[in-house]
Image (spheres, rainbow, N blue to C red):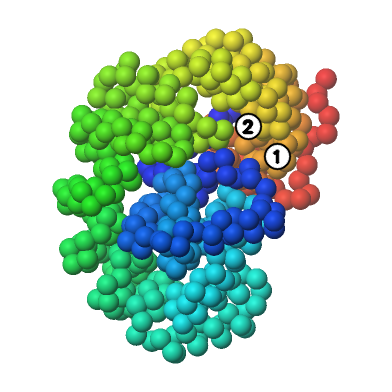
Amino acid sequence: MKNRVLTITLYGTMFCKSFIVYGEQGSYTATKDTLVKDMELISKADKDYNSESSTQLYLTAKRIIVDSLPGEQVKAEKLLIESIRQNPKNINAYVALAKLIQSQVAQGNKYPQELHKSITLINQAYEIDPERPKTRFASADILFYTGQVKSAEDLYLDTMTRFPNHRDTYIEKTRIYSEKNPQESIRNAEAALKLGASTDDISQYLSSALIRSTKKEVLANKLKSYAQKYPDRWLWHKTALAYANNRNYKEATNAFEKAITLGNDVESRLQLAVMQYSIESKNKKAIENLNKLITILGEKEYISTTAYSLVYAHLSLAYFKDKKNEEAALAATYAAKSSGESKQFYTSLVAEYKKINALYILDNSLNYLIKEEPSFELPYTVFAEINRNNKKYGTAIEMYDKAISLEPKRDDLFAERAITYYKSSSYENALEDFEAALKLRPHTAIYLYNKACMLALLGKKADALKTLKLAFIEDKKLIELARVDSDFASIKSDNLYSSQFASLILEDFDEKWSVTESEPQ
């Protein structure tokens, strides 16, 4: 019989779409009336507005949006609203807030109804300055999203034709060409920067264009040259990643440190720490950076708690590599406590410790989850595996029972309990569980194969061969496993069935092939 192994890799970055969280705002149900009232609050801003303060608020918000820290978008939204209140003519703030809302709706963190707020903001910006390319491009986006594709295209082309050398046009071209025409994107980025564009407006698109247009072996140096020419925290970050991919860890470290100095004190510090403990064995430096990162996260007003979970997960592994098991266990518990509803990063941490046969580090964190979140099945499955590895099959089965009661549609849980029954020589129960797994996921080759093993061990040789044939149809690689599998010993030694088993192994079967229909008496 073959065990089914599931592996999850611990992410080295916290910026995946499913991870970004928008605080409690996602529970807000927007209506037309409330959206109008929000816009009225902005329109009734102080007449004696502070243009300089408004600009600084906008720039701070823009930086937060670019950095994409989970949960901090709430702060960016508040800053942009205040920026507009202080200067109702700050078009940049209107457009940035509108695009932030669009992004949050696209990520599922705001209700689609809130797009009306985005449309209202763009319309207000357009009314303030209908000749500003930025407002025209934003209006074209709204037309496109609302199904008015032809009108959107006309407005785009008209704007680019009328304002070919405007900074806004160069920035927009940097964005739209970054994937399909990276060289054109790079040319427009350079033109925008010469006209005073902020690197926050283009660095992500510029780095994407450089990556797409440059050979891997020279990419790091190319990114570095641009980062030196246009100092930016994200250009240096991409440079560091490129050097790390080339295994030039010294240059990668220098680039990460440049990015941190320029303000990328979360993502770059995290990636640097991961590289230090997982590749360079610089465990103490990694631990120092990860502890520093926890302090930095504590200074963020709206940061999602799941960000802590990711950092504590890496800190646990760094401590373990530094042979500090108590600290590793404590960090793992903190990772569990801050893991949120999805438990994404704690689940990945479990997988990492499983790979290195060190699940014992997680005892305290697992017990915490069982006590505080008894409806979460993972602790039961991990304890089940630990007990099974220690040949405490009865306890392991009890743990799988609890996990299955919480997740009755998980085929893999039935398969894992079946393996436990098999190891305890309870073949009837194992057969029932493999059949249950197949009901949930029919035609799964390994389930069919293991079911055949149980049938053979129970002396049901004809049924075993029929099921084994079905397994081979699904995955012929299992033939080599069956060739040496002792679970089929009774069939191999039985003159009535051994030739039929040999035909299966030699792949000498077709749809007309059938085994003996009745078992020998």
**Residue 430, percent across and down?**
68, 22
The amino acid beneath tag 1 is: Arg
Q: Can residue 364 be seen in this view?
A: yes
Report the residue marked by disc 2.
412
Residue 56, above or below 307: below
Mark 2: few/some/many CA within 10 Å (<14, 14-19, 20+): many
- Which residue is at 57% across, 40% downward? 24
**Residue 354, percent across and down?**
44, 27
The image quarter in which residue 313 lies: top left
Q: Are marks 1 and 2 in contact (CB under 8 Å)?
A: no
**Residue 375, percent across and down?**
63, 23
For label 2, the SS is: helix
Image quadrant in which the C terminus is located: top right
- Which residue is at 76% across, 35% downward? 439
Q: In the drawing, does residue 120 fall left or right of residue 62?
A: right
Q: Residue furthest bottom?
A: 161
Q: In the drawing, does residue 208 fall left or right of residue 323?
A: right
Report the residue marked by disc 1.
441
**Residue 141, percent across and down?**
55, 72
Q: Can residue 485 be seen in this view?
A: no
Image quadrant in which the N terminus is located: top right
- Which residue is at 31% across, 32% downward? 295
Residue situated in front as seen by the camera: 442 or 400: 400
Q: In the drawing, does residue 503 fall left or right of residue 277?
A: right
The amino acid beneath tag 2 is: Asp
Residue situated in front as seen by the camera: 144 or 499: 144
Q: How far apart are marks 1 and 2 (CA)?
A: 9 Å
Residue 39, above or below 172: above
Mark 1: few/some/many CA within 10 Å (<14, 14-19, 20+): some
- Which residue is at 38% across, 87% downward? 164
